[in-house]
Amino acid sequence: MRLEVEIALARAAGRLSRLTGKGGGTTLPGKLLSRVDPAAVTRLAAKLPHGSALVSATNGKTTTSAMAAEILSPRIRLAHNRSGANLMSGVASTLMDSAGAELALLEVDEGALPEIARQVRPRAVCLGNLFRDQLDRYGELELIAERWRASVAGLPSETVVIVNADDPRLDALARARDNVVRFGLSDRRVARDELPHAADSTYCVACGSPLVYEASYVGHLGEYRCPECGATRSGLDVTAQGIELDGLERTRFDLVTPQGPCRVALELPGLYNVYNALAAASLSIALGASLDDVVTGLARFRPSFGRFERIPAGDRTIIVLLIKNQTGANEAIRTLLTGDAPAIAVVLLNDEIADGRDVSWIWDVDFEPLFPGLDRLVAGGSRAEELALRFKYGGLDESRIEVVRDIGRALDRGLELTPPGGELVVLPTYTAMLGLRDIVARRGLVRQYWEAPDSATPAPGPVVPS
């Protein structure tokens, strides 16, 4: 009875938050509940008949968990934090609204994973990657990796751990466990010619020697070996082969699993989305999904908000690609260049807590391949001037750079420069993406992310003012 009263009061606070325009009410109820009853998350999670599954990564956890939800939801009732509220408060809010749910599918912030895993005691944990991100908040990769290692070691033996074995640190932290599913890519045709300069985990976890890469796919993810101690990538249980990258439109690949192979058609571009799909497929299969469930679920999937989302804006289209660290930004640019290089781009750089105060990562982003076709760059956000300086030092002529700090005005300037029928590429950091999406929602182009059953689906309504 006490828990029910606490939940009712917390929900009322969430509704008030939405009514007053202070936010979507996706985290406040859980924050209040966790404050008044620290054991509430554990008790709520224990009520779910099929338990909980956690998804964490530096990049791609929102897309991976949304893909898994698309695969699993026809067969099982889910409690899923689809809004992306992935700290303890967001998880608590999701579990508060889990009445009738059978399984909690929870995207989890990489820093919050150890505590959430301790409280939830998950049935499955899916770990996608570890890249440098928000150094002022997390510190270097070694710190997060060590916390993850301790967290995984403390999981119950029956918990299945799904890891991206193409990430040397994740492969290493799972080696001491028996109940592990390893996924990765096996198609050197789509590998880079060399390891990118901004790659992170390039030293052997066992002996500290530089790793040799036979294939580098995304950042430091790939096929690696240590020439000194002989450590190498573990054998893969689930892999992608025969990968076809079709510009900015779609991706096809052969999904090879212990249950057999199948051909996957994904309406998303980019090699990083093949990794997201592999993670979602591996997790879903571990939770009981069939290959047919995986194929049909991934075929239905459409981008989560802000992740290669296309938003109609009158006679123009806005393409939004979240960038939050150097690896994600480099892969977004790499994917963009598989299609027609953008002539107009709006890049939005904020330095709020959720972005990380330290924005030095922009100097590790390879913006330069965009320059030959870029007629105009609109730099916006709270650190717009530093972003403009980065482009200037990179060699983009000053006459092609405009600084418009206000996000709404930066968007309007980009749309003004985009010809009718054209596409405007917008690359925002996390809080800039939320601000941008709030603007287009208030203009009637999309629903708010906490309202729409499919938050990537545009809402009916008026077009953006010209």
Image (cartoon, rainbow, N blue to C red):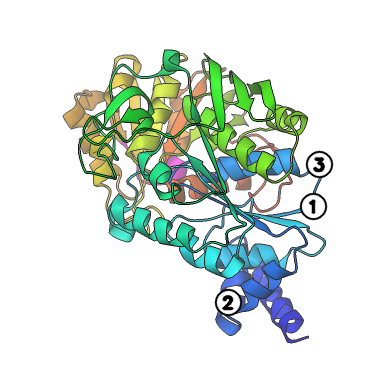
Given residues 259 and 442, the one toward you in this image is: 259
Label disc, if present, on residue 92 of the rendered structure: none
Q: Nearer the viewer, mark 1 or mark 2?
A: 1
Left or right of residue 218, residue 22 in this image: right
Residue 268 figure quarter: top right
Label disc, if present, on residue 74 of the rendered structure: 3
Secondary structure type for disc 1:
loop
Q: Residue at x 64, y 38 (%)?
A: 67
For the question of whether residue 434 can be seen, the reply is yes
Secondary structure type for disc 2:
helix
Q: Nearer the viewer, mark 3 or mark 2?
A: 3
Given residues 90 and 342, the one toward you in this image is: 90
Query: Do residues under tags 3 and 2 come within 8 Å of each other at their CB atoms?
Result: no
Residue 325 percent across, percent down from the top left: 35, 42
Is residue 225 depicted above or below 30 in this figure?
above
Given residues 236 and 422, the one toward you in this image is: 236
Along the polypeptide, which appears first: circle 1 or circle 2? 2
Residue 122 percent across, percent down from the top left: 61, 60
Q: Which residues are magenta?
A: 403-409
Specify few, some or many for label 2: CA neighbours under 10 Å numbering under 14, 14-19, or 20 or more. Answer: some
Residue type, numbered disc 3: Pro
The residue labelled by disc 1 is: 77
Q: Gap in Å between the C-alphas at discs 1 and 3?
A: 8 Å
Is residue 313 depicted above or below 252 in this figure?
below
The residue labelled by disc 2 is: 34
Along the polypeptide, which appears first: circle 3 or circle 2? 2
